[in-house]
Amino acid sequence: MTAYDTRHDDPPYIFPVPTRVVFGAGTVDRTGELVREHGERALVVTGRTAARHHGHLDRVLASLAEAGVAAAVYDRISANPRSDEVDEAAALARARGTDVVVGLGGGSALDAAKGIAVAAGLEASVRDVIGVTLDPGVPVLPLVAVPTTAGSGSEVTKGAIITDTVRHFRSGVRGEQLFPRTAVVDPDLIASVPPAVLAETAFDALAHAVEGSVAAQATTAGRALAHRSIGLITTHLPAVLGGDRDPAHRSALSLAALLGGVNVATASTCLPHRLQQAMGSLPGLGISHGRGLAVLYPGWLRHTEPLAPGPFGELADALGADSAYAGVERLREAAGLTARLSDWGVTAAELDTLVAGVSGNLGNDPAGATADADYLRTLYAEAL
């Protein structure tokens, strides 16, 4: 169990995850001392431009050097992490004798870092474990996660979504070993995130809270965290998108993403996440995770809200709306996330490919056993 003091007006949270959470402005400069607790030779995994451009990578490397940690950098992670990138970085980790991995960036960089920690320990391709829940004895290098966006919550989850570039298949690598040892959550890092990216990552966090509160595995305690996350997003995201740069907004959104990640770790997700992951079956489709979810949500809510009136009624209250559908639509429109699949070049002829690419636990959704191929195709068609 992880204790976390929000340093705000909220009561302390007790998270049912093993990750140590270090939260607050300036905590990125403690990365070195926190990594040093787990190893002496680090591989820093990040995306291609943002972390370097905004100075986050330099701060992490300086902190590692000050703590006496030797560091190499792999900075070629794509927006949706690919198995070939993960394998290339894992080979680098093995060659350098890496004993701890540092993920720096958004959900893609953190998920890639998890995949690298697995593949380096296995001395095998990450492709061998995509779509697999790891056995407890599978070796995984320790991981420290430093999110630079407020959305994925991957800093406190036990899974990583990676695209198998051979099979054109996107799914999760999962296991208790994938929980980061430490999450360094510095809300000031999201100050450099462009508004459009901030909006789509916040929608990802919202989706984690919505799905985590209606999933079959949802608990009373988890719903409370989910509703708190939703309240933070609906209160603070419009202000940030309106140009308000008060640090309190950044802190609130980072906390919302963290709470959403806890929901993923404990209650998992529902059909929108399974359907979005399957978009990896269409090579070249460049839609981000958050925007992909936003495309799917109207149809999913229309079909799903009547199936679980109690949990969705509570969600509507948390959203401050007459229905969950109305509340999410209001936020989706305010965030500029109203595109459809057809706007990204997807055609009706490709819907069957999408359906065939769906994997994972479908029974966690309120639709349950009724979520057959025809039902999935209907949801994709409405997103088209």
Image (cartoon, rainbow, N blue to C red):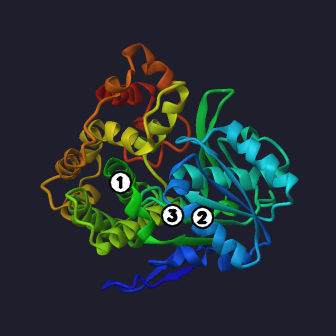
Q: Residues within 10 Å of mark 1 (few under 14, many from 20)?
A: many
297 left or right of 263 in image: left
Residue that mark 1 sits on? 198
- Pair 3/1: label in front: 1
Query: At 42% from the left edge and 62% from the top edge, which residue is drawn?
Result: 218
Q: Nearer the viewer, residue 174 or 71?
A: 71
Q: Can the viewer see residue 26 in this picture? A: yes
Residue 345 position by quadrant: top left
Residue 76 in which image quadrant: top right
- Residue 111, placed above or below residue 190: above
Which kind of residue does numbered mark 3 sit on?
Thr
User: What residue is drawn where x is 33% and y is 36%?
Assistant: 295
Q: Is residue 153 left or right of residue 309?
A: right
Single out the mark in the foreground, 2 or 1.
2
The residue that mark 2 highlights is 58
Q: Callout 3: helix, strand or loop?
A: helix
SS of the residue under disc 1: helix
Frontmost residue, 64 versus 21: 64
- Dot placed on the residue nearer the N-terminal end, 3 or 1: 1
Q: Find residue 244 and report its horizontal and vertical position in percent.
A: 22, 65
Q: Where in the figure is residue 204, as x and y percent of width and height?
A: 39, 51
Upstream in the sequence, badge 2 or badge 1? Answer: 2
Callout 2: SS: helix
Cα–Cα gap, marks 2 and 1: 22 Å
The reply to whether discs 3 and 1 touch (Cβ–Cβ < 8 Å) is no
